[in-house]
Amino acid sequence: MELIHLDAFRRYYNTHIFPELQRTERLRKRLLLLLGISGVIIFLILTVSSYLGIVLISLFLVMPITFYVFYLGYRIQRFRQEFKPRIVGLILDFMNEQLNFSNLSYDPRGAIPKLLFRQCNIFNTRGDYYQGEDFIKGMVGEMPFALCELQVREQSPMTNKLQDVFEGVFLHAIFAETDTTGNIVVWPRRRKQYLTRSIKEYNFNGGQNQDFEINDPVFRDTFIVYAQPGTHVQGILSEPMQEAIVRYVAITGKDLYLSFIDRHIFAAISEERDLLEPSIFSSNLQFELVREFYFDIMAILKIVEAFDQTH
């Protein structure tokens, strides 16, 4: 599929990513063997001490066994933390070689600032819980961008418990044009019942429904469009852009939220899974595991690329 250069990526996977996966697979098997042997030894020690009925020995063993279990947990966490940066680094190397992408970099612990997320107008939330990871930044054509995985929750006024606001990939990009002005928010129509507060807040601040400005019938059926007075909606959300966004939703099946504040573009893509998370108990030698992460990142950057090419 041209959208994601899948054939070229498959060849790159075979020559660059698969050898690295083989190396991590050997590490995973050694870790799994360690877990298995450790489990058997701990079980035998506890069984023997219980059978002998020597309480003092059992109590004496609790502390070192507890520390060892924590050590095993540390080894598992370390394997997971080292797996993703290696594979993502190789994926970004491939993307850097593609036309129109440059300066891509990755920080596994980085995130888009909470203040920037709150300023996007998409979600009206305090963001009491805000956790981000897998920060990627770079250039798409002349447009700088940054994206990361986010989990955002807020305290419910009814139950005093945290409730989900957003979970998925959040992106921020900046138009190269310095004279771009306007303020638009695009929400998935099928999520309207969950966005009542956000829509009311935007409306309270002067935003008005602009569905009548949208010529693409599929886009109009899929999204709700609001804008501030004086915004030239079709100047920012052009028909080629509407087609690109509709195509993205058709290909991925995911909920896409967008907003435009002058030169700033924000996009939120719902995704409940932790992308490219390695397994300990099953093989990670799967092209599908890597392809899915590449597909998700490339697909959303293609929307940014469409903005770059149509403005």
Image (cartoon, rainbow, N blue to C red):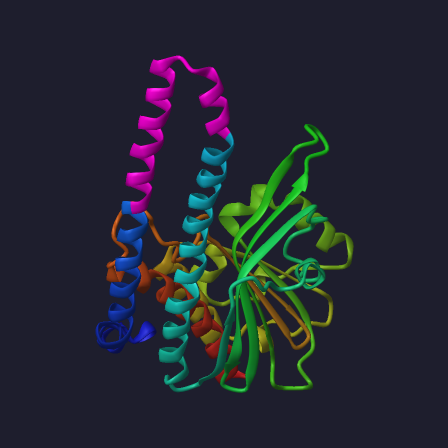
Q: Nearer the viewer, residue 306 or 44?
A: 44
Residue occupying image coordinates x 25% and y 52%: 283
**At which x and y percent is residue 43?**
33, 28
Q: Is residue 53 magenta?
A: yes
Query: Eyeballing the image, is 151 above or below 103?
Result: above
**Left/right of residue 90 with respect to residue 210 in the rendered view:** left
Residue occupying image coordinates x 54% and y 87%: 142
**Left/right of residue 77 with respect to residue 252 in the rendered view:** right
- Quarter of the N terminus within the rendering: bottom left
**Left/right of residue 63 with respect to residue 277 in the rendered view:** right
**At which x and y percent is residue 235?**
59, 78
Query: Eyeballing the image, is 98 above or below 271?
Result: below
**Highlighted magenta segment, given as a residue range:** 34-62
Predominant secondary structure, magenta span: helix
Q: Is residue 108 magenta?
A: no
Q: Nearer the viewer, residue 283 or 6?
A: 283
**Left/right of residue 113 with respect to residue 143 in the rendered view:** right
Residue occupying image coordinates x 43% and y 70%: 244
Would you identify the image quadrant in which residue 51 lies?
Answer: top left
Residue occupying image coordinates x 51% and y 56%: 223
Query: Eyeballing the image, is 253 above or below 106?
Result: above
**At which x and y percent is residue 19?**
25, 70
Picture mark count: 0
